Amino acid sequence: MPDSSWTETGSSISLIPTTTPIDPGSSPSNVNYLTNSYKAALMQQYAGELAMKTSLDSLATTWGCSATAYNNAVAAINTTITGFSGAPANWATIWPDGTMSGPWMGVQTMLSSNWSAIATQRTALQGAISAAQAAAAQSAAVTAAILAAQPHAVAWAYASKPALPSASYPAGYYAITTDSRTVQVDAAGAAWVDVLVATTGLFGQITVGQITTGAAIADIARVGSLTAGYIYFTDGFCLNTLEPKESGANVTSGHILTANSKPLNTVTVTGIPEVLIGGFAFSVNAASTADVYNIFGRIAGRQTAGSTGADCYIDLYVDGVNKTYQDCYFAGGLNTDGMCAFYMSITGLTAGAHTFQFYAHSGASGTSWTIWNTSTALCQRIF
């Protein structure tokens, strides 16, 4: 109550209930009585809690959480007033009635316990709802990352590529068409980018119609060894135009490069300001604007302050400019270790050297995360 903690001192009383008009010159304060001002405040608080109950019951149903304990705690207020104290059943609508009611043995003490139980159960229910919402958001983010990262055999041909943007084809989505073409959605989710182009498939014959001219012929076959069964000879194409397999453990004949990275140290993120995750970076060298960079990562850490289910953002900076970001949610509540996966895709970089760096920040003040140096990321370059 605004002017009472429901724990005033008591005194010996008569057990005969009385109703006494309020004396403007005095303000009795006794655990066995309810003054007119106490009645008004109680009625206002009870009405507010009923409104809160309606909202939380709806959310609990939506997110599959039990609201029984909270509902029972709210109902206990009415039981105390009518069952133990003998107030009229319609007290919540007729009070304040201009009187001081009592004596009702320890009525203020019982109400104090009732409100304490309501606060405890309300907080527990709100926490359960927030945890359910965070788990659902994390599941949706993981599903989206998987959808974008994995190659998918689609039911349409290269010439019939669906219009973008589309929720069915998010940024980074791989598609293998019915006529053996491989395409990918760019980082903006707005255009298809050719990944592997071969009208008869990846392992089909290379014909004169697929070969440009001049020095470009030397880039067509970069393999370890070839046999006559795999070569289709045409004018201007001979064995001295073949180049040996590219060097490097992470290089394949499909022109894909991969690199790994992890933070040097544990990083603490507090509030909205961005924090550089030291050592969590890649140095890349683009051949052209058609190069595609796919980054798959896993953040290990825990939320240490703030509302449960708050989000931590992982930002990707390219050459010092923030290019994209992803939300991370650590399920399990405060001070509980967890992991979240993230996926990012970048294309359109100018030819030459570039630096990728990771930062982290919160979407709200008053929140804090610890990011462990066991977090990892893999950068895949397709060119």
Image (tube, rainbow, N blue to C red):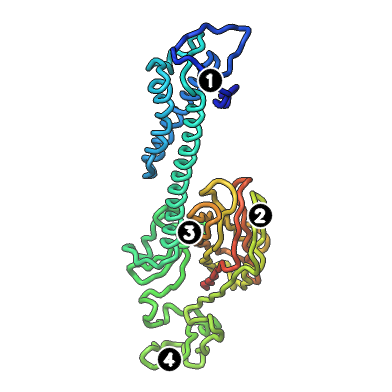
x, y percentage for residue 205?
38, 83
Task: Tell me the CA gap for discs 1 and 3.
Answer: 55 Å
Which three-letter amino acid code belongs to the residue tagged 3? Ala
3 or 4: tag closer to the N-terminus: 3
**Is residue 164 in view?**
no
Which three-letter amino acid code belongs to the residue tagged 1? Ala
**Is residue 298 in view?**
yes
Task: Tell me the CA gap for discs 4 and 1.
Answer: 89 Å
User: Are the residues flagged by discs 3 and 2 in contact, CB closer than 8 Å?
Assistant: no
Q: Nearer the viewer, residue 60 or 69?
A: 69
The image shows a total of numbered marks equal to 4
* Residue 226, numbered label: 4
1 or 2: tag closer to the N-terminus: 1
* Residue 274, numbered label: 2
Helix, strand or loop at disc 4? loop
- Please identify the quarter of the rendering in which residue 16 is found: top left
Helix, strand or loop at disc 3? loop
Residue identified by numbered label 1: 41
Label 2 packing within 10 angstroms: few (<14), some (14-19), many (20+): some
x, y percentage for residue 179?
34, 70
Task: Tell me the CA gap for discs 3 and 4.
Answer: 36 Å
x, y percentage for residue 94?
44, 12
Task: Tell me the CA gap for discs 3 and 2.
Answer: 24 Å
Which three-letter amino acid code belongs to the residue tagged 4? Leu
2 or 4: tag closer to the N-terminus: 4
Please say if 211 is above or below 179. below
Q: Nearer the viewer, residue 49 or 186?
A: 49
User: Are the residues flagged by discs 1 and 3 in contact, CB closer than 8 Å?
Assistant: no
